[in-house]
Image (cartoon, rainbow, N blue to C red):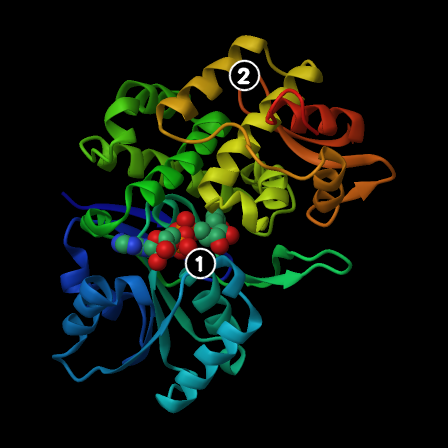
Amino acid sequence: MSTRIPITSHQGDYDVLIEPGCLRTAAKYIARASQARRVLVVADEQVLAPHAAAVLESLQPDGWEATITTLPAEEPLKRMEAVERIWEAALAGGLDRHSAIIAVGGGLTGDVAGFAAATYLRGIDLVQVPTTLLAMVDASIGGKTGVNLPLPGLSRLGKNLAGAFWPPKLVLVDAETLDTLPLRAFRSGLAECVKHAIISDPDLMCLLEQHAVALREGDRGAIEDILVRSINAKRQIVQEDEREAGCRMLLNLGHTFAHAIEPIKELDLTHGEAVSIGLSAAMTCAERLGLCTADAVNRVRVLLTDLGLPVSIAQHEPAEALCAAMRYDKKVDGDRLRLVLPMQQGACVRDDVAMADIEAAWHSVMPPSSG
Ligand SMILES: NC(=O)c1ccc[n+]([C@@H]2O[C@H](COP(=O)([O-])OP(=O)(O)OC[C@H]3O[C@@H](n4cnc5c(N)ncnc54)[C@H](O)[C@@H]3O)[C@@H](O)[C@H]2O)c1
């Protein structure tokens, strides 16, 4: 089955095409979406074979000029140096202003290759070919690209602090690529689906609950429905507020917490796992502010746990240090932080969350004696 989800953007509309096996016929779809015939495939080195190879193979006939470069999908290497290497590969491949970059990989590859496309010759076409669940339902859609920067005075990176809004010309979602995805990475993607469900789709929440046990083991029986619902949830928000001046901020639900712990090496968290813990902390924070009930907090925690995702951190820094790291992520006013918080239905942006409530939320995801 093939599903096309059109997305409107001020920088040009584009489609998300969901079709099993579509990588093998990628050239056909790319040719419809972009004028480019000289392309650089930027592949996560883990998916060079078979996924990036399938895309390259589809480009062989019909006179495409295609070159390929790879990058390791490691968060500490999501830096400007990776973007520079892509620019250099683009120059070596003879890419001009009418060429395109095709990003094949997870969210990290899409973010870095997307930023390279946004800045090479002041911007060339970008095609996103997400190969992780997380990138399919979230990172490849909406045009956010970027890299991490070192935080002054702290021995860690700040997430996505340099970047650009650069929507793709096309997103090709081939769920068959999930066959090779490790279970841990698959589960990580489910965290962003839960986020979308909390923000705007109660039916998606029920669907995830219904299939939680199977999904936890990597069963993809319900994945088509989950992909379509989750991509639609993101579509609605980015169409309404492409530049994150309003409702798009809701997509940061759980992320301000997540960004504080994701770069801590000792915790060894994937982005999705950090988001899962972040969602859990945000739920507690919301309960403290009277935005949702203890039952709602419990429901989300049970779902995340059933999906095989963490809702607490074993090792950690003191809650105060995590609060300090959060200050780099979002706007701060004195001892108050802007935070997205869940409500009984949906989510809201609060400008006035006191550090004391945030600290308490951190404690709720830490072992009782610590902090
Ligand atoms: N731009 C956005 O709107 C947005 C939204 C959410 C997350 N992100 C970013 O996305 C990144 C996380 O994305 P992710 O979870 O996809 O992680 P990732 O890109 O790091 O991929 C996770 C792991 O899976 C491997 N992999 C990818 N596809 C595979 C496949 N099909 N088979 C086998 N292995 C495969 C990768 O090599 C990596 O080891 C973070 O950097 C995050 O900041 C961006």
* Amino acid type at mark 2: Val
The answer to whether residue 172 is above or below residue 191 is below
Q: Nearer the viewer, residue 253 or 245?
A: 253
Give the residue pinned by disc 1: 108
Decide if ligand 1 comes within 8 Å of the CB at mark 1.
yes
* Quarter of the image that includes the C terminus: top right
Q: In x, y percent, where is residue 282?
A: 61, 27
Q: Nearer the viewer, residue 314 or 86?
A: 314
Callout 1 crowding tier (Cα within 10 Å): few <14, some 14–19, many ≥20: many
CA gap, disc 1 and disc 2: 30 Å
Q: In x, y percent, where is residue 162?
A: 62, 63
- Residue 79 in the figure: left or right of residue 61: right
* Amino acid type at mark 1: Leu
Callout 2 crowding tier (Cα within 10 Å): few <14, some 14–19, many ≥20: many
Give the residue pinned by disc 2: 297
In the rendered image, the residue lying farthest to the right is 334
Decide if ligand 1 comes within 8 Å of the CB at mark 2.
no
Give SS at disc 2.
Answer: helix
Residue drawn at 30 percent across, 39 percent down: 227
Give SS at disc 1.
Answer: helix
Q: Nearer the viewer, residue 42 or 236?
A: 42
Task: Place residue 334 in its image quadrant.
Answer: top right
Residue drawn at 62 percent across, 20 percent down: 284
Residue 141 shows in this picture: no
Q: In x, y percent, where is residue 305?
A: 41, 24
Residue drawn at 50 percent across, 74 percent down: 83
In the rendered image, the residue lying farthest to the front is 369
